[in-house]
Each structure stands twice: as structure tokens, then as C-alpha cells.
Amino acid sequence: MRIRILFFSLIFIAVVYACTSDDSDFCLSNQQSVQSGFYSSSYSTDRDTTVSDVVIYSTGIDSITYDTATVSKTFLPLSMHNDTSEYIIEINKLKDTVSFVHTKELNFVSGECGFIFTFELDTILYSDNQIIDSVAIDYPSIVYGENIENVKIYLY
């Protein structure tokens, strides 16, 4: 009888330990950010482009996401409160606007991490005044742990 109790106690401890793994990386991930890449519209096939002197800031948040950076890919956080997140992209003093229209769903992660949002991109609106030729949704789901480019931004 004692061996059974000891056996079940060890199994219970192992199950509890496995279910309470460290979620700190998960909780701090970019799971609510659109992963986007810059591409040149001059080629017939997709060629990623590294762009210098990039400034990206949100119209809804008083913060600059990128400040005179050299980037080929970006992580742009989506709004937890609205269904649209808008950014100004400025390259060498030329500006265009990109608006991500999205839905969100609240999902439970764990007792340590709590809840996170999973987003789904619906539409992207953009101005094509100075630098942006077009924008395409490559992968509409924004889910934790996926290192997948969601959006392609084609530049003139």
C-alpha cells in the first residue's frame, strides 16, 4: 500500500512540475506584434530589402517603435483596445501610413502567465504616396511562438 501511495505521489509531483514550466519567455514574447518585412517592388520575385534611416511610430501610442534604424524586418505591436493599429513609416524623410485592421481573441496560457491575445489580420490599408508601393498579408494569424512573417511591405 505504501509503495502505491509513494508511486502515485511521485507521478502527481511529476505532472504538476511539467505543467508549471517557466513561461517567462512566453509572457515576454512578441506574440501581439505583426512581423513585417521590407521588399523591393522593382523585382519580379520577392527580394528582402534592408532599409536605412527608418523611423516607425504609432499614431495611437506616443512612442517611436524604430528610430533611425537599419532594418529589413520589423515587429509592430497591435492595439489591445482597438481593432485597428496605425503606423507612420518614414524613410529618409519620406512618409507613408500603414493601418492593420485585426480581430483578437483572448486565450488562457497558464496560471503564471495568465491570458494573451491571439490576433487575426483582416485588412491592411496604406497610403502609397512616397515610399510604399503595396502591402500584402502573407500569414494572417499572429500566434505566440511562431516566427513567421505576417506582412510584406513593398517599397518603390
Image (cartoon, helix red, strand yellow):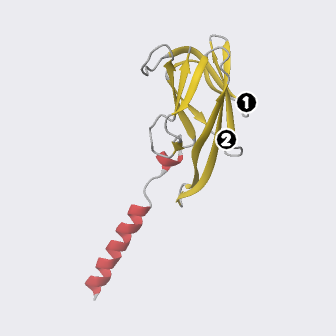
Compare residues 91 and 123 and report the one nearer the observer.
Answer: 123
Q: Which residue is mark 1?
A: 59
User: Which residue is found at the position 47% from the left and 52% from the top?
Assistant: 23
What is the count of numbered marks? Answer: 2
Residue 107 x, y percent position in the rendering: 56, 56
Mark nearer the N terminus (1 vs 2): 1
In this rendering, is residue 116 above or below 14? above
What kind of residue is marked 1? Answer: Thr
Residue 94 x, y percent position in the rendering: 66, 13
User: Which residue is found at the position 62% from the left and 37% from the top?
Assistant: 123
Which numbered circle lies on residue 79?
2
Q: Is label 1 in a helix, a strand or a loop?
A: loop
Compare residues 20 and 101 and report the one nearer the observer.
Answer: 101
In this rendering, is residue 20 above or below 153? below
Q: Which residue lies most toward the left here?
A: 3
Compare residues 13 and 85 and report the one nearer the observer.
Answer: 85
User: Which residue is found at the position 67% from the left and 41% from the top?
Assistant: 79
Residue 154 x, y percent position in the rendering: 54, 21
Q: Quadrant of the C terminus?
A: top right
